[in-house]
Image (spheres, grey):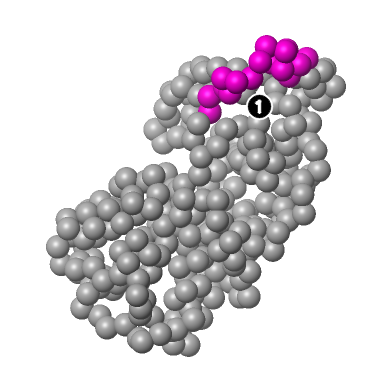
Amino acid sequence: MDLSDDDDSDKELKELLEKMRQSEREKNPNPSPPPPPLPKELESEIKIATNLLKIIYKTAENESIVFSPSAISSALTSISKNVDEIAGKEIEMLIGKDINYDEKYFKDLLYSNNLFYSSDLTLLESQNCKGSTESDNCWKPIDYSDKIKAAEKINDIVSAETKILKLIKPSDFANKDNFPLFLGNAASFKAKFQEPFDGQKSATFFSNPPRTIDMIYTEAGVCWRYSSGKTWKCLGIPYKSPERWLYIILPNATDGLANLIQEFDYSMIKKCLYE
């Protein structure tokens, strides 16, 4: 993600932006313009993301978690079209019913969406990717008996489609002798923020263990969105494209992340976007 200032910005424009910033600091440190209508596709992604985060957190509460709900929902939607009733209900429990998913909605992302199945299995005719190439988003056979080669092949395919070089490690397959399917999904996005940041400074983050890292900062954001609830606060930062925003949700309590994750649902995220 490129967070650098736009070198083509002239002096006059920078002075104007600074005046706008100063005006906003005096009037309202957190101006919040009305957001656009929430697309049905995004509504579905929010519901999937909040469900998945709660499930993942239970098994990896001491690890950093990064996942793309759009990539996962795309893969599971593809699977759900040709599975038995039991598997269909399990997928429905995870991503919900009547999910509005449209791949065109995510066309601007560098996207990899592959399902790597064990080469010991035979696919149904409906799942075969006829005429596909190694770079197609498709079902691909993998020999999981050699975990090192399996990880290398998956990483090679994903890195050819995105900027992500090492999606998985051989150790991710550890203690899994019977490994029928791996969802090798990744999405990457690169853009500049609408307003340049003022610079970098060191700050301590309350991770486990706490870390001091360099972070970008600004004294106030023009046209940023800010909302808050009883236990949380949310900041929205726009990219140069007005349809793209970065939203950061944090607990009010220093050690409140675990409890906040349990509160995540569609209504809460909607408040973050619209209030």
Is residue 251 at least partly visible in the picture?
no
For this view, does 157 lie left or right of residue 58?
left
Q: What residue would you read off at disc 1?
A: 195
For this view, does 129 lie left or right of residue 245?
left
Which residue is painted at 21% across and 60% down in the image?
A: 150
Magenta extent: 3-19
Residue 235: where, in percent of width, then height? 67, 36
**Looking at the image, how many numbered discs can be counted on the residues?**
1
Is the residue 55 above or below the residue 63 in the image?
Answer: below
Is residue 215 at least partly visible in the picture?
yes
Residue 181: where, in percent of width, then height? 32, 70
Which residue is painted at 45% across and 34% down in the image?
A: 207
Quadrant in which residue 262 is drawn: bottom right
Which residue is painted at 69% across and 63% down in the image?
A: 40
Is the residue 76 above or below the residue 3 in the image?
Answer: below
In this orientation, which residue lies closer to the viewer: 56 or 162? 162
- The amino acid beneath tag 1 is Glu
Which residue is painted at 19% across and 68% down in the image?
A: 143
In the structure shown, which secondary structural element does the residue marked by tag 1 occupy? loop
For this view, does 194 lie left or right of residue 92?
right
For this view, does 266 lie left or right of residue 119?
right
Callout 1 crowding tier (Cα within 10 Å): few <14, some 14–19, many ≥20: many
Q: Is 39 inside the magenta-drawn segment?
A: no
Quadrant in which residue 241 is drawn: top right
